[in-house]
Amino acid sequence: MSELNKENKKSTAGKVPVWVFVLVLVVLLGGAYMLSEQRMATTDDESRTEPEMTSLQEEKSPKMREGNPVVAVVNGAEIKRQAVLDFIKTLPDHVKSMPIENLFPMALDQVVTDHILAQKVETANLDGDPEVIDALAQVEKEIKRNIFLQRQLDDLVTEDKLKAKYEEFTKQFDGVEETHARHILLESEDDAKAVIAELNEGADFVELAKEKSVGPTAERGGDLGYFKKGDMVAEFGEAAFALPVGEYSTEPVKSQFGWHVLMVEDRRNIEPPAYEEVRSKLEQKMRQEELFLLMQSWQKGADVEKFDINGGSLEVEYTPDEDGSADTAEQTVEETAEESAAEVSKPAETPEAAE
C-alpha cells in the first residue's frame, strides 16, 4: 500500500458418478496426508541418527516400471495401474501433490471400492426403479436446458459484437493520464519550507526524502509510483498533476496526512489493455446481458397470466424494468473499464483516494 493509503486506512467404473468417490477420497486423503507429513517429519528426525533405517525404507518403495500391469482383481475383474493413475488425475491439486508411493495405495483402495460398489449396483437391478428414472429425468432436463441456452447465446455473442464492445470499452481510457511522483511528508509547514529551501540550494530530492520524510515511503526516496489524479486525496492529486514533469513544488501542499513537498518524474496516458487480455471478461458480461434480454423477450412473447399467493387476481403486477438491460450494459462497460484501468495503471503501491 502507498504512504497516502496507509495513513488513510490501515475413473469412475460402472454407473456410479465419480464425484461420490472423489469426495470420500479427499476426506480420507486429507487425514492421510497429514499423517504422511508427520511420518515424513519423524523420518527426517530419525534419519539424522539412523541413516541405515532410512536407506532400507527407501529400498522397500517399489519404483514404477513401464507398462500397464494389473494392480488388483475384484471378483474376477482386473484393475490396471492406468485406471488408478487416471483416478488420481481427478483429485484436487493439494492431494495430487502427495508422494506417489503414499498416494497410490490409498487411490487403489478407492478404485477397488468403486469397482465393488459398481458391481453391487449392477446386481441391484435399478434400471427400472422409479426413483432412478425420476432423478435421471431431472438431470436430463437440466442438461437439455443448459445446452439450449448455450447455443442461443453462442448465436448472439459473436466476435464482431465483442470487438465492438471492446472499442466502446477503450473509450474509457481516452484522455486519462497518470503521473509518477515522489514526495516528502513533513509534520509542519515550517519543516516543509525548510526542505524546499534545501532543494533550491541544489539538494537531491531522493536523499532528502530518505532523510527527512516521516512517511513509510521514505526508505525508497518518497517514490509513489504511477497514479491517477482520483487515486489521491484532492489536494495532493491537484498539486501533482499541476506540476510540470521534472519540477518540485515550491510551496508546501497540505493534506490530512501532513505537509508534502512533491516532485513529478513522469506523466503518461493510460493505454487500454489488449483485446485478448479482456476478451474473456467482456464475453462473460455480454452473455449475461444477452441472457437477460433473451429472457425478457421470451416473457413478452409468451401468454402469461399471474395470480397472487392465494390464486387470486393481482392488483399490481411486477414487471422487469425495460431499461434495466441497457443500464446493465452501460454499467458493465464502465465497471470493466474501471477494473482494467486499475490493473493497467496500478504501480507497485497505488495510492487510494481518501474518503
Image: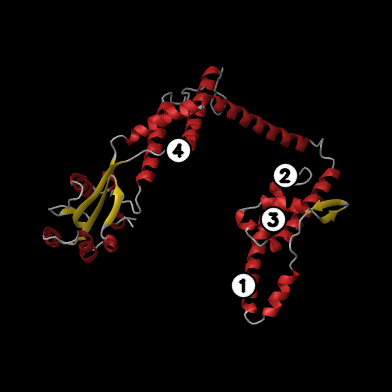
* Earlier sequence position, callout 1 versus callout 2: 2
Q: Quadrant of residue 97?
A: bottom right
Mark 2 or mark 4, earlier in chain: 2
Disc 1 from disc 4: Cα separation: 45 Å
Mark 2 burial class by Cα count in 10 Å: few <14, some 14-19, many 20+? few
Vertical arrangement, residue 269 with respect to residue 215, above or below: above
Q: Amino acid at mark 4?
A: Val
Per the image, label 4 sits on a secondary structure element best described as helix
Separation of disc 2 and disc 4 at Cα? Answer: 36 Å
Residue denoted by label 3: 25
Three-letter amino acid code of the residue under disc 2 = Pro
Label drawn at residue 41: 1
Dot 1 or dot 4: first in sequence order is 1
Q: Which residue is mark 4?
A: 278
Instruction: Quote the CA–CA distance across marks 1 and 2.
Output: 36 Å
Residue at (45, 40) in percent of width and height: 277
> How many marks on residues?
4
